[in-house]
Amino acid sequence: RTKSEGRGGYCFYEAEMDERIEARRALSTDLRGALDRNEFLLHFQPIVTTDGRVVCFETLVRWRHPTRGFVSPAEFIPLAEETGIIIPMGEWILRQACTIATEWPSDISVAVNLSPIQFRHSDLPLLVRSALRDSGLAAPRLELEITESVFLEATPAIKATLAELREMGVSLSLDDFGTGYSSLSYLRRLAFNKIKIDQSFVKDLPHEQSGAAIVRAIIDLATSLKMTVIAEGVETEAQRRCLLNLGCHELQGYLFSRPVPAKEAEALASRQGLRHEKIHAA
Ligand code: C2E
Ligand code: MG
Ligand code: MG
Ligand code: MG
């Protein structure tokens, strides 16, 4: 610690850095065995139409750490990507999600998040085909969510993978739209079916004028390109109303439901199938 001599602040900073690096190292060691120890589980969050009908559940992975309790995916997904664990983990998530979705009414689909690493370092079409075959889920009921960052480097290989997935009949959604640099017409060429407006834009509605203008522009252009627009992170009735006025097609957020365990998702889905029950009907 010679560098810290005479500068208490520097020393503190350095110690804090060491601690953080150590904590990350410990966590990635734990992460390595988590799959075999069955510590991952899936939660599902409904995506609803403008009249409150559930059309899809997004799969959100959870890690129940033996001593630390639930660890946020924001913390462990980047670690899983750095260590490569995202490959077997992503396969488990996809297979599990497809299997669970076969228990829902056939007009409800399942969305699964994919990591850019899965695009670069695994045979995604092969995995998707196998997950569909083994689970018996029809391809159109599977929606793959891909973040905009994948396309900063849309290589011919990535484009070919996307085209192959589309030919299989699965649906492609662009996640966290607006946080990267892609243009909508470019995305149209990559054959995306849906875009999900990032929750940071939704947060400021309906008060922020420029926010509403951006959301309106995205919705108008996407609609003219025949893409479905989903708004993420809808928490208030005012946001819901504003998004409906702007012409948004589908909504997702705590206003409708938090992500819930598979059992609860199934109950929600089958209740709707039986009684045509709607969440927050307009
Ligand atoms: P994402 O795919 O954009 O997922 C949306 C996140 O927003 C989820 O956080 C969800 O719980 C949260 N959310 C939903 N509604 C609301 C709301 O009304 N307000 C607020 N403030 N948040 C809301 P979560 O589950 O913590 O996941 C965070 C991110 O981790 C996801 O962002 C996704 O990028 C990644 N992730 C989660 N599950 C998986 C997975 O199975 N595979 C991969 N590759 N990534 C995943
Ligand atoms: Mg997502
Ligand atoms: Mg998102
Ligand atoms: Mg996100």
Image (cartoon, rainbow, N blue to C red):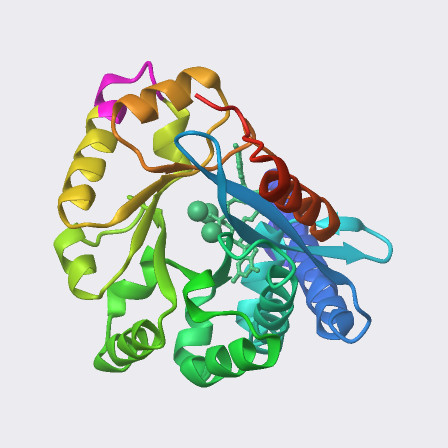
85 on left or right of 141: right
Q: How many marks?
A: 0
In magenta segment, residue 210:
yes
Residue 209: image location, x then y, percent: 23, 17
* Foreground of the two, 65 or 79: 65
Locate the N terminus and report the quarter of the image it occupies. bottom right
> In the image, 187: left or right of 274?
left
Q: Farthest residue toward the right?
A: 67
Q: Viewer-proximal residue, 138 or 115?
A: 138
Q: What segment is highlighted magenta in the picture?
A: 205-212
Residue 142 visible within the image:
no
- Nearest the viewer among 132 and 243 is 132
Quadrant showing the C terminus: top left
Quarter occupied by residue 169? bottom left
Quadrant for residue 214, please give it.
top left
* Residue at x 26%, y 80% (from the top left corner): 160
Residue under the point 48% across and 20% down: 236
Quadrant of res 124: bottom left
Residue 43, position in %: x, y?
66, 51
Q: Is residue 202 magenta?
A: no
Q: Position of residue 95 (x, y in %)?
A: 60, 72
Residue at (53, 83) in percent of width and height? 130
* Residue 48 visible in this rendered orientation of the protein: yes
The image shows residue 221 at horizontal and vertical percentages of 15, 42
